[in-house]
Image (spheres, grey):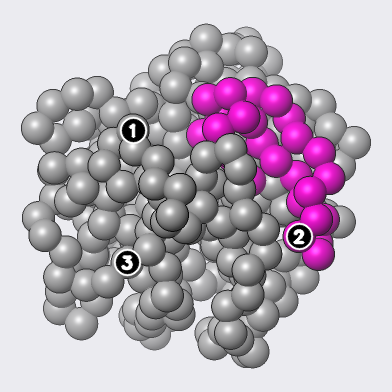
Amino acid sequence: MVGTNAHEGPVYVPGEDALYFTTLPAPGDVPRVDIKRLELESEQVSLVCADANVANGMALAPDGRLVVCEQHPAAVTLLDPATAATETLVSSWRGLPLNSPNDVVVKGDGTVWFTDPSYGHLQGFRPEPQVGDYVYRYDSEQGRLTVVADSFDKPNGLAFSPDESVLYVTDSGANQEPGSYHVDRPHHIVAFDLLDDRHLGPARLFAVTSPGFPDGLKVDSEGRVYASAFSGVQIFSPAGDPLDEIGLPGAVNFTFGGPDRDVLYITTDEAVWAVQLEARGA
């Protein structure tokens, strides 16, 4: 465990043996969120980007930059961790502003897939939504943003199966206003088969999270699905059967890392935890 104000979007960078993460939002009319770097060998934490537009989930781009979900203003951006220089990938759909980009993955073909729930509006720092709470695919070569799923209450974490034939998405609709839990609203994981490189088949219920609602989501090399819950990180078989749980109340998000990708780095509001696994990340 490393004590630090961690929260969301952990990204492991193999060449640096370092973890990048966004911090717990500091109170204010517009919450302040920083992006920080944890050097794992020395356990030294350094500031990468201060007041990073209420950044949330992140992923690693093929060129080594970070793909960042920013909520205010709403956008998905590229961040050079060495210089803190940023480039906006996308900030609107059909001329309408995005809501609050939440989590993001980069598919093997370089396309960027992300969720866009309206949590910023619910938390009081974003205007009323002009688009739905969608899951998007962005093709940078074509400059094209496409809605790939529109059936969610609050789409949150997302991950592809190891062969990228299935997309998993968490729905944390049970969480509306800060600190709430509405048991009659979604708190589950949905799976979609990919019909081709950009179209999804019908949604199917994969697993229901209990206790609480799911947030972060990852898949290991054997296709097992990991999702955070109130009690820790829950592990499901590729068929959606519960297998195990890493007990860590307060777990928010996580990522696989280490030279063999067999360490799960889990962020909470107060620390980054490392769990040695027999499994490896996809």
- Residue 279 at x, y = what percent? 86, 42
Q: State which quadrant residue 47 falls in.
A: top left
Q: Earlier in the sequence, mark 2 or mark 1?
A: 1
- The structure residue drawn at horizontal position 81% and vertical position 39%, both measured from the top left corner, is 244
Q: Nearer the viewer, mark 1 or mark 3?
A: 1
* Residue type pointed to by label 2: Gly
Image point 76% across, 60% down: which residue?
240
SS of the residue under disc 2 = loop
Q: Is residue 26 left or right of residue 190?
A: left
Please state which of residues 134 and 165 is positioned toward the viewer in this rendering: 134
The residue identified by callout 3 is: 133
Compute the Cα span from label 2 to label 3. Answer: 24 Å
Numbered tag placed on residue 25 in the rendering: none
Q: Is residue 235 magenta?
A: yes
Residue picked out by circle 1:
179
Who's the residue at 14% across and 35% down the image?
A: 30
Which segment did they paint magenta? 227-252
- For disc 2, the marked residue is 240
